[in-house]
Amino acid sequence: MSHRNHHQRPGIKDYAIIGDCRTAALISREGSIDWLCLPDFSSSSVFARLLDPRGGHFSIAPSAEFATRRRYLSRSAVLETVFETETGRARLIDLCPIVDGVGSLEPMREILRIIEGIEGYVDLEIEFTPRPDYGHAKPELRRVTDDVWRCGWNELLLLNSRLRLAECGASLRGAVRLTAGMREHVSLAYVDRDIGTIAPLGTEADARCERTLAWWRDWSRACRYDGPERDIVLRSAITLKLLTFCLSGAVVAAPTTSIPEAIGGSRNWDYRYCWLRDAGLTMSAFLGLGFHQEASMYLGWLLHATRLGRPKLSILYDVYGRTNLRERKLDWFAGHCNSSPVRIGNDAVGQFQLDVYGQVIAAAQSYAASGHELEPAEARMLAGFGKVVCARWREPDNGIWEIPGRRRPYTFSKVMCWVALDKLLWLHEKGIVRLGSNEKRFRRTCEDIAECIESQGFDADLESYTGTLGAKNVDAASLLMPFFGYREYSDPRAVSTYNRVQAELGSHELLYRYAPGYDGLPGKQGAFGMCSFFAVGHLAMRGLVGEAQCLFEHLCSFGSDLGLFAEEIEPESARALGNYPQAFTHAGLIYSALSIQRARAGGGR
Amino acid sequence: MTPVHGASPYLALWGLIATLAMTSILEASRGLGLSRLSLPFLIGTFFTSRRRWAIILGFVLYTIGGWIFAFTYFVLFASVGVYTWWFGALAGLVHGFILLTCALPLLPFVHPRMASEYHSASAIRQLEPPGFLALNYGYHTPLSTLIALIVYGAALGGFEQVERAAGL
């Protein structure tokens, strides 16, 4: 239960996510939609108060002091926020309806808000302040009927509600006294380049809510994880699904941009795109939980959306596989907690990362190893990636963490090159990929890479694999080596690397990616959620189930009350940092839980 | 040559040549990383979800379709009495615009395996919608499509000029 504080902006963990697998909205604990991009994840924002108080919002909250309690309705992405005031209790249900708009006249996108009196009475205030195009567009608000308002710019929003709203500057405001048993609906429909649809209210809106709940519960039934951590694992699975773009199969890293890696800092990046470095882990999460259709869609996206640059891979793409993503700064936004600049687009698109080849091939190999077939064209694509690896593996790159500036010979990049060729050879041996005369070349190069890693990427004094070849730094990415099959979890070099990484990068049982300051960028960053979860997997797969379980529970305590995780965690304050919620962290959580489950079943070593 | 005078005996051949030229440009633009649009694949997936068969079947149907469609061009040329490469190119340009602005955006609503902006979340693997001007398949898609259709029209429109020059 939390209490309203008018003087403090919500923290990152105060936000919940709702979505329809095409876009997502972030809703504060106080019932305000403070982030929404339309029509897709990476489109421009309509509400962006998350980044600036003038960015637009859509709030429904009591006018008096109140406390809130919130949760997702069981096994769904439908959010319930209960407001409690001195006079009574009311609840707010928020959802993006998942209904067929092709065979009916449902809107292209919709946010449905249902308010219901539970006990006594609650005076609610509604404020609708759209600020489209990242606050740049000047929307025209106009009443269409008694219940319907239109907000037009190049696109169109249609707000439908029986609550009395009045124009107040560039906002709509209203108030209602909600008594026990009263139920009101507010529907916000969106359309782009088409005739708008006004979504009906009343029982029809309730039916949309019921259908959406049924859809999510039906979807959740496919989750085959049945350990004691099922609730948090399923929440991570639902979050991962919410970050899936259903029109192409892509999975975006996060639905937000420029949530800082340190409050007041400038490490603010746009994560509303798809990173290939997430491929191996994301595929593993889908397959491990039994979501094979999602795995299939994701692989389809990985192999076909990346076609424009084939066989060379970019490190990130938009949901349709486009790479025209150069960065721009939104100077008119103050940034989350005054952390400027706010960026859209991501200049990392111009970087070179060798590990992405291994990630994509490992994802395809996991998919095939689960009994799925690869199309001949897909198999040829994979072989093409292998040729690129053979030609370029010796080159320095920007590494898995996209460290800007001078390219370096990152050890983990070499490992992923080894993984690319090793998995291709496995696929060849299974008759899935035909390497032909390239087989010998791939095998020889694979051995060369391993020899290079062992001779230059392992430091005997440190007893650890190093961050870069021949250097003394360590990198938490080294923990991923056993996951990709480069070493056994129990291999002495893997164990001693784990110990060294914990010693040098650990803080409050969390892990930084690399030593603070190593990347040369100004400002601080937090511990990296995904790496911390990987430590759990490491312990579990070595058979240290009890330790793994303790660490897992400890890490889960850093999530929000709804089980959502950002990219990073500030160890001292447990504050969430970075874009939120973050697919990579949730995939890491799922991986670690699956590892514990396997270890419990006797699969750990 | 007009319908009154009778069709050239090489008309069918030129229809095929124009279709293959257009297809080659579209496929080359895919190979060069300019676009992901594959019209044969989109046609093939009307009938099968198996990629390999979709490509083969789509290519056959697309070639036959392009070949038959050439006769529409010939009727157009005959109706205005202009048989020149530039008029064919102009017709190809218009054809390309219609394809990009009407036919492809309509496709998600008639294609059994393609998602549209109105599709809800689903676990079924679907084809991506082309979007406005097919830009979802790459920013150069409108350009490569228009060029391919201009070449198609120019080849059809200019065939009589070539025939005349060759003394056929």
Image (spheres, coloured by chain):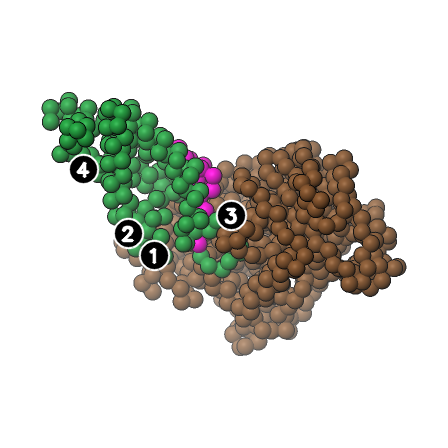
Chain colours: A brown, B green
Letter of the chain that mark 1 sits on in the rendering: B
Q: Residue furthest top?
A: B165
Q: Which mark is residue B12?
A: 4
Q: Which residue is mark 3?
A: B117
Residue B40 image point, x, y percent: 32, 46
Q: Which mark is residue B57?
A: 2
Sooner in the amino-acid sequence: mark 4 or mark 3: 4
Sooner in the amino-acid sequence: mark 4 or mark 2: 4
Bounds of the magenta segment: B126-143
Give the number of the mark in front: 4 or 2: 4
Q: Which residue is mark 1?
A: B48
Residue A552 image point, x, y percent: 65, 66
Residue A444 image point, x, y percent: 34, 55
Q: Quadrant of residue A90?
A: bottom right
Q: Secondary structure at mark 4?
A: helix
Sooner in the amino-acid sequence: mark 1 or mark 2: 1
Q: Residues within 10 Å of mark 4 (few under 14, many from 20)?
A: some
User: Spatial distance from mark 2 to mark 3, Cα to Cα?
Assistant: 27 Å
Q: Secondary structure at mark 2?
A: helix
Give the number of the mark in front: 1 or 4: 4
- The answer to whether tags 4 and 2 share a subunit is yes
Sooner in the amino-acid sequence: mark 2 or mark 3: 2
Q: Amino acid at mark 2?
A: Leu
Q: Is residue A144 above or below residue A92?
A: above
Q: Is residue A43 above or below residue A575?
A: above
